[in-house]
Amino acid sequence: MNNRDDVLEINLGELFAVLMGRAFLIISAGVFFALAGLFLSKFVIHPEYESTTKIYILNKEENQTVTYSDVQISTQLTQDYAELIKSRRVLEEVIQRLHLTDMEYKDLYDVLKVDTPSDTRIVAITVKDKDPLMAMKIANCIREVASEHITNVMDIDAINIAETANVPTDKASPSVARWTVIAGFLGAVVVAFFAILGYLLDDSIKSNDDVERYLGMSTLALIPLTTDEMEQKKKKKSKQKKAK
């Protein structure tokens, strides 16, 4: 009895041939999914807009000039400022001031992004919303409330406005180009995956090489499945003899 572990051998040449044989189907699926992604991102999904405001923070003692150590300390504290900006107290105060009755703290926290570029004392506050005007209002309100909160907690003199939020004109998401490319790529990959899966699961015998590969036996002879060509040749020979 021959105890051998079954080993799946993949012929890369045959696999490539299978993919090339399904090339039209793969490309068609990619184009179809790309068009679907373009349609969804442009006409179905509601666009969202981002508005950004920036504050400049410098911690220094009263009646003192700004020193290099003040700059270093302020840079190191920007992460603390970012956490204070995203605190529950600040966001709930913003919700009350703007009368955002349909929004809770967690909802506002999810659409808020605070960036603190390295080696700077600038904190960028970005808010995303479906209404560009509301995105601007929320960003500016967060800046005002956060400035008051940071001043009280960190005991600093003041926070300067580096940039006020404006009404965004270009949508931040969804990106039509990104959706189109990703959808087209995924569509092509899915069809190619099923083509490869069908090739791997197909264990039917197609040639004498398959007999040796799967059964471990050598073929002695090949019997053609069809004899149409042989019959046609015989008919031609018989007609030629009759003609003579």
Image (spheres, helix red, strand yellow):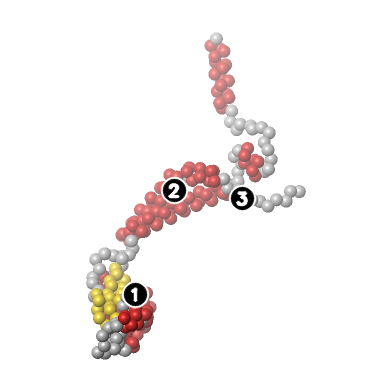
* Residue 102 visible in rendering: no
Q: Which residue is mark 3?
A: 8
Q: Nearer the viewer, mark 3 or mark 2?
A: 3
> Of the residues under marks 3 and 2, which one precedes in the sequence?
3
Q: Which residue is mark 2?
A: 26
**Residue depicted at 36% across the width and 59% down the height:** 178
**Residue depicted at 31% across the width and 71% down the height:** 128
Residue kind at label 3, given as amino acid type: Leu
**Residue depicted at 29% across the width and 89% down the height:** 61
Quadrant where the image shows the C terminus: top right
- How packed mark 3 is, by other alpha carbons closer than 10 Å (few <14, some 14-19, many 20 or more), is few
Q: Position of residue 231 (x, y in %)?
A: 57, 24
The CA distance from mark 3 to mark 1 is 56 Å
* Residue 31 visible in rendering: yes
Identify the image quadrant of residue 218: top right
Residue kind at label 2, given as amino acid type: Ile
Secondary structure at numbered mark 2: helix
Q: Is residue 48 left or right of residue 243?
A: left
Q: Which mark is residue 119?
A: 1
> Of the residues under marks 1 and 2, which one precedes in the sequence?
2
- Residue 193 lies, with reference to residue 88, above or below; the image says above
> Of the residues under marks 3 and 1, which one precedes in the sequence?
3
The CA distance from mark 3 to mark 2 is 25 Å
Secondary structure at numbered mark 1: loop
- How packed mark 2 is, by other alpha carbons closer than 10 Å (few <14, some 14-19, many 20 or more), is many
- Residue 220 lies, with reference to residue 135, above or below; the image says above
Identify the image quadrant of residue 43: bottom left
Is there CB contact under 8 Å for labels 3 and 2? Answer: no
**Residue depicted at 68% across the width and 43% down the height:** 216
Q: Position of residue 60 (x, y in %)?
A: 29, 86
Which residue occupies the foreground of this view, 174 or 73?
73
The CA distance from mark 1 to mark 2 is 49 Å
